[in-house]
C-alpha cells in the first residue's frame, strides 16, 4: 500500500513539473510576447507582420495548440511509466 | 435564384438536419441526458466543444471588435483560446476522473458541503442565463435581416428548434447536433474569408493574406495603418489600452473561459481521462481555425469598408452611389448617415458620428432629401457615419460583392453558432435545477425517471425565459457578458483548481473564497457598468472586464488564509483527491 502511495506521489510530482514547464511557455508567448514586450517585438518584421502584433493576434494561438498536444503526449508517456493508464 | 430563396433553403436545410439528428439521438436515461452516456469520441467532443464555445459573439461580433479596436482585440483572441490550455492541464482530466455530471457536483462533494454546492449552482445559473439571452437575440437579428421577418418571430422559431433537440436529446442530442453545427458555422466563416483574401491579396489562406503585400507595393497592415491615421484613428497595429489593463483583461477572459460550466461539462462526456486531454487539443484546433482567421477578416473588412464609404480618394462618396447593403443595414438600424456638411457625400472618420455613440432615428421612418433615414443626434465630429461593429461579418460578403449563396451560407452559419451555444447553456441550466437542486439538495429520493422529467421541464422553462430575454433584451447584454466571465474567473475557476491541487483546502476556505471573489467582482462591475462609475476611478487602471482577475486573486488569498486557520478536511476527502489525480479507474467512477 505505502509503495503504491509513494509511486502515486512521485507520479503527481512529475505531472506538476510538466505542467509548470508548459505554463511558463504559455505565459511567455501570450503575456510576454503579446502584451508586455509587444512594442519591442514590433520593431521586427515577420512575414509582413510586426512580430509583437503577430504574437498577439495569431502566434500565441498556434503555440497554445502545440502546448496542449505536447501535454497530451507527455502525459501518455508518464501514465505508461507509472502504470496508471486506462 | 433570389437571395431570399437561397437563404430559406440554407437555413431550412440546416434546421432539417439538426432535427433529424435530434430524433436519431434521443436520450433514454439521466446519464445520456446529462453527459451523453459518457461515450463521445474525443474528436467529436472536440468539435462539439468548439461549436458550444463559439457563440453568436465569436461568429458575428468578434471580427467587428478586432476591426474597430485593432491590436487590443488580442485580449479577446488570446483570452478565449488560452483558456483551453488551462482546461487541458489544470481541470478537464481531473474532473473527468471525478466522474460526476456537473460542476456543482464536484464542488459539493469535494468540499463536503451543501452550502458550497448551492453557491456553485447559483453561479452556474447566473453565468448561463447571462450568456443565453445574447444567443437568442443573435438568432433574431439574422432572421430579421435575411428573412425579413420580425425579430420576435425569429426568436420563436429559434426557441422551437432548440426545444426540439435539447429537451428530447439532452446532452446526447446536443452533442451530435453541435458536430453538425460546427461544420456549418466553420464553412460559413471560412468561405467568405477565403474569397476576401483571394480578392484583396491573392493568398488562399487568410492567415497569411493579412501579412501580404498589395498591388500598391505596401503591405495590408501598412495600408491599414496609413488609412487609419489619415482618418484620425490610432494606427491599427498599435494598442490604446494600458498594459496593465490588457494583462488583467486577458487573464480574466482566459480563467473565465476555463471556469464556464457549459464548457467544463463537455469534458464529462468522453470515455477516459486521456480522452479529456485529447479532446481539449481537438477543441482548440477547431476553435483556432476560426480565431486565427478573425484578424484577417477584421483587417480586410476594414479596408473594404473605408474604401467603399470614402471612395478611393478618401473624401467621401455620394449617398446615391452607396451600394444596396449600405441601405439595407441602414434600414435594420445598424448603419446611419447624417449629412453634416450638406455636400450629399457620405464620409467616415474618427470620433463618434452621433452623440452618445448610437444614432437616434426620427419617428415614422422619416427620410431626408437623399432618401436617408433621418437622425436626431449628430455630434460635432466631422464623421458622418455610424457603423455597428456587428455587421462586419454579416455584411462583409456584400461589401466584397461575393455571390448570393455565400451570403445565405453566412446567415445559416450565424444561426448555427447561436443555436449550438444556446443549447449547451440551456442544458447546463436544466441540469443544475434537476440534478444539483432537486436530486442533491431538496429531494434525494426521486427516481432516475423522475429526475429526467424534471430535467426536461427545467429545460422548457429555461428556453421560455431565454426567449423572453431574446425578444425583450435587457439594455445591458454587452455589459453582462463581462459579468459572466468575471463570475466564472472569480468563483468557479479558483474553487475547482484548489479542489484538485490542494489537499488542505477545506469547506470554510472554499466558501469564504467564493463569497469574497463573487462579491468583489459583482460590486466592481455593477458600480462601473450600471451606476455610472467613470474610467478615471478604475483601480490601478483595471477595467471592469479585467476585474475578474482581481476577484480571482482575492478568492485564492482569502481561501488559503481561512483554511489555514480551520481544521483540515476529513480523511475520505483526502482519498478522493488522491484518486482524481490518477487516471486509472475512470470507468468505474461513473457509477452514480
Image: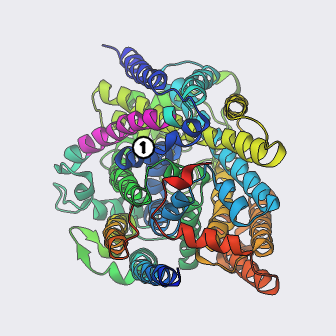
**Neighbours of disc 1 within 10 Å: few (<14), some (14-19), many (20+):** many
The colour scheme applied to this rendered structure is rainbow
Q: What percent of the width, then of the height, locates residue B265?
A: 56, 50
- The answer to whether residue B69 is above or below residue B513 is above
The reply, left or right, for residue B426 in relation to residue B250 is: right
Chain letter of the residue beneath label 1 in the structure image: B
Between B62 and B85, the one nearer to me in the picture: B85
The reply, left or right, for residue B541 in relation to residue B407 is: right
Query: Which residue is located at x 54 percent, y 36 percent?
Result: B32
Q: What percent of the width, then of the height, locates residue B590?
A: 55, 51
Q: What percent of the width, then of the height, locates residue B384?
A: 53, 45
- The answer to whether residue B163 is above or below residue B258 is above
Residue B581 in view of the camera: yes
Query: Which residue is located at x 44 percent, y 79 percent?
Result: A11
Query: Which residue is located at x 78 percent, y 59 percent?
Result: B526
Residue B385 in view of the camera: no
Magenta region includes residue B320: no
Q: What percent of the width, then of the height, locates residue B71?
A: 43, 66
Residue B366 placement: quadrant: top right
Residue B309 placement: quadrant: top left
For the image, the number of numbered tags is 1
- The answer to whether residue B415 is above or below residue B260 is above
Query: Which residue is located at x 30 percent, y 13 percent?
Result: B1
Badge 1 marks a residue whose secondary structure is: loop
Between B436 and A62, the one nearer to me in the picture: B436
Between B418 and B31, the one nearer to me in the picture: B31
Magenta part mainly helix, strand or loop?
helix
Disc 1: which residue: B40
Magenta region includes residue B193: yes
Between B97 and B222, the one nearer to me in the picture: B97
Please give the range of residues in magenta. Answer: B174-196
The reply, left or right, for residue B18 in relation to residue B384 is: left
Amino acid at each position: 500500500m505505502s509503495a503504491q502511495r509513494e509511486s502515486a506521489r512521485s507520479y503527481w510530482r512529475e505531472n506538476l513539473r510538466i505542467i509548470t514547464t508548459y505554463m511558463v511557455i504559455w505565459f511567455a508567448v501570450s503575456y510576454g510576447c503579446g502584451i508586455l514586450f509587444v512594442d519591442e517585438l514590433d520593431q521586427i518584421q515577420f512575414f509582413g507582420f510586426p512580430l509583437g502584433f503577430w504574437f498577439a493576434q495569431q502566434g500565441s494561438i498556434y503555440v497554445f495548440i502545440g502546448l496542449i498536444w505536447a501535454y497530451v503526449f507527455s502525459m501518455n508517456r508518464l501514465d505508461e511509466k507509472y502504470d496508471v493508464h486506462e | 435564384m433570389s437571395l431570399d430563396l437561397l437563404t430559406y433553403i440554407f437555413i431550412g436545410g440546416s434546421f432539417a438536419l439538426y432535427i433529424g439528428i435530434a430524433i436519431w439521438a434521443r436520450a433514454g436515461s439521466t446519464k445520456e441526458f446529462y453527459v451523453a452516456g459518457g461515450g463521445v469520441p474525443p474528436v467529436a467532443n472536440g468539435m462539439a466543444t468548439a461549436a458550444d464555445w463559439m457563440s453568436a459573439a465569436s461568429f458575428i461580433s468578434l471580427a467587428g471588435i478586432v476591426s474597430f479596436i485593432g491590436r487590443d482585440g488580442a485580449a479577446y483572441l488570446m483570452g478565449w483560446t488560452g483558456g483551453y490550455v488551462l482546461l487541458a492541464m489544470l481541470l478537464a482530466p481531473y474532473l473527468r476522473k471525478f466522474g460526476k455530471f456537473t460542476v456543482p457536483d464536484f464542488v459539493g462533494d469535494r468540499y463536503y458541503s451543501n452550502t458550497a454546492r448551492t453557491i456553485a449552482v447559483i453561479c452556474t445559473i447566473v453565468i448561463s442565463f447571462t450568456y443565453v439571452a445574447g444567443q437568442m437575440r443573435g438568432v433574431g437579428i439574422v432572421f430579421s435581416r435575411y428573412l425579413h421577418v420580425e425579430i420576435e418571430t425569429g426568436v420563436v422559431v429559434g426557441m422551437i428548434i432548440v426545444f426540439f433537440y435539447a429537451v428530447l436529446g439532452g446532452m446526447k442530442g446536443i452533442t451530435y447536433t453541435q458536430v453538425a453545427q460546427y461544420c456549418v458555422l466553420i464553412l460559413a466563416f471560412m468561405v467568405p474569408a477565403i474569397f476576401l483574401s483571394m480578392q484583396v491579396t491573392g493568398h488562399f489562406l487568410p492567415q497569411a493574406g493579412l501579412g501580404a503585400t498589395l498591388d500598391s507595393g505596401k503591405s495590408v497592415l501598412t495600408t491599414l495603418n496609413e488609412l487609419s491615421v489619415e482618418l484620425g484613428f490610432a494606427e491599427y497595429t498599435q494598442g490604446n489600452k494600458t498594459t496593465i489593463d490588457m494583462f488583467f483583461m486577458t487573464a480574466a477572459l482566459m480563467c473565465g473561459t476555463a471556469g464556464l460550466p457549459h464548457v467544463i461539462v463537455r469534458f464529462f462526456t468522453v470515455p477516459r481521462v486521456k480522452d479529456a486531454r485529447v479532446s481539449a487539443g481537438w477543441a482548440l484546433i477547431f476553435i483556432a481555425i476560426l480565431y486565427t482567421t478573425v484578424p484577417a477578416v477584421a483587417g480586410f473588412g476594414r479596408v473594404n469598408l473605408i474604401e467603399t464609404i470614402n471612395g478611393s480618394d478618401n473624401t467621401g462618396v455620394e449617398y446615391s452611389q452607396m451600394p444596396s447593403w449600405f441601405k439595407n443595414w441602414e434600414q435594420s438600424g445598424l448603419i446611419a448617415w447624417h449629412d453634416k456638411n450638406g455636400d450629399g457625400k457620405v464620409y467616415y472618420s474618427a470620433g463618434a458620428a452621433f452623440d452618445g455613440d448610437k444614432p437616434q432615428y426620427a419617428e415614422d421612418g422619416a427620410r431626408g432629401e437623399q432618401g436617408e433615414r433621418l437622425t436626431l443626434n449628430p455630434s460635432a465630429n466631422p464623421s458622418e457615419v455610424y457603423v455597428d461593429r456587428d455587421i462586419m461579418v454579416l455584411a462583409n460578403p456584400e461589401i466584397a460583392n461575393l455571390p448570393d449563396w455565400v451570403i445565405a451560407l453566412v446567415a445559416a452559419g450565424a444561426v448555427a453558432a447561436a443555436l449550438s451555444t444556446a443549447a449547451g447553456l440551456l442544458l447546463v441550466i436544466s441540469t443544475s435545477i434537476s440534478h444539483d437542486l432537486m436530486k442533491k439538495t431538496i429531494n434525494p429520493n426521486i427516481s432516475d425517471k423522475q429526475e429526467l422529467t424534471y430535467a426536461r421541464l427545467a429545460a422548457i422553462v429555461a428556453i421560455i425565459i431565454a426567449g423572453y430575454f431574446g425578444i425583450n433584451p435587457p439594455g445591458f447584454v454587452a455589459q453582462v457578458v463581462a459579468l459572466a466571465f468575471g463570475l466564472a474567473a472569480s468563483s468557479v475557476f479558483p474553487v475547482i483548481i484548489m479542489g484538485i491541487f490542494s489537499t488542505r483546502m477545506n469547506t470554510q476556505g472554499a466558501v469564504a473564497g467564493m463569497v469574497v471573489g463573487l462579491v468583489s467582482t459583482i460590486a466592481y462591475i455593477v458600480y462601473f457598468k450600471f451606476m455610472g462609475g467613470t474610467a478615471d476611478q478604475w483601480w490601478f487602471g483595471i477595467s471592469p472586464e479585467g476585474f475578474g482577475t482581481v476577484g480571482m486573486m482575492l478568492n485564492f488569498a482569502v481561501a488559503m488564509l481561512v483554511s489555514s486557520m480551520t481544521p483540515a478536511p476529513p480523511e475520505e476527502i483526502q482519498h478522493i483527491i488522491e484518486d482524481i489525480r490518477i487516471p486509472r479507474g475512470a470507468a468505474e467512477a461513473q457509477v452514480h
